[in-house]
Amino acid sequence: MLACAEGRANARVADDLGVSRETVRKWRARFLTDRLESLADRQRPGPPRRITDERVEALVARTLG
């Protein structure tokens, strides 16, 4: 969103970030509709996560430490 706010075109943002233009269009549209709330992760189909953020953080710390 910061690159978009600087006036960069969707194609350039997509190229810079290594994502599709459609992905940039989707996130820009979400942001225009719901502002900052749209940037939060949305619920996804399937069962809820069984691993907590704390466990993920501990594993990453152990791996990097």
Image: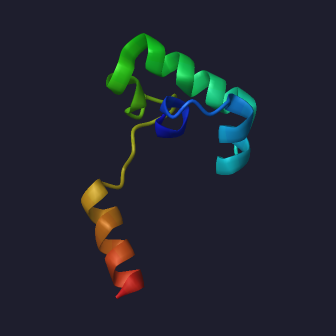
In depth, the one of 34 and 13 nearer the eye is: 13
Judged left or right of residue 2, residue 58 is: left
Residue 61 drawn above or below residue 22: below
Residue at 73% x, 45% y is 15
Residue 17 drawn above or below residue 60: above
Residue 6 drawn above or below residue 36: below
Examine the image and state in which quarter residue 48 appears. top left
Examine the image and state in which quarter residue 12 appears. top right
Examine the image and state in which quarter residue 9 appears. top right
In depth, the one of 5 and 37 nearer the eye is: 5
Residue 51 in percent (x, y) is at: 35, 55
Residue 10 in percent (x, y) is at: 68, 30
Q: Quadrant of the C terminus?
A: bottom left
Residue at 55% x, 23% y is 28
Res. 18 visible in picture = no
Asked which colour scheme the image uses, the reply is rainbow
Residue at 29% x, 72% y is 58
Judged left or right of residue 47, residue 36 is: left
Res. 50 visible in picture = yes
Residue at the extreme top of the image, as rendered: 33
Judged left or right of residue 52, residue 45 is: right
Residue at the extreme left of the image, as rendered: 54
Residue at 41% x, 31% y is 39
Residue 51 drawn above or below residue 3: below
Judged left or right of residue 35, residue 17 is: right
In depth, the one of 47 and 9 nearer the eye is: 9
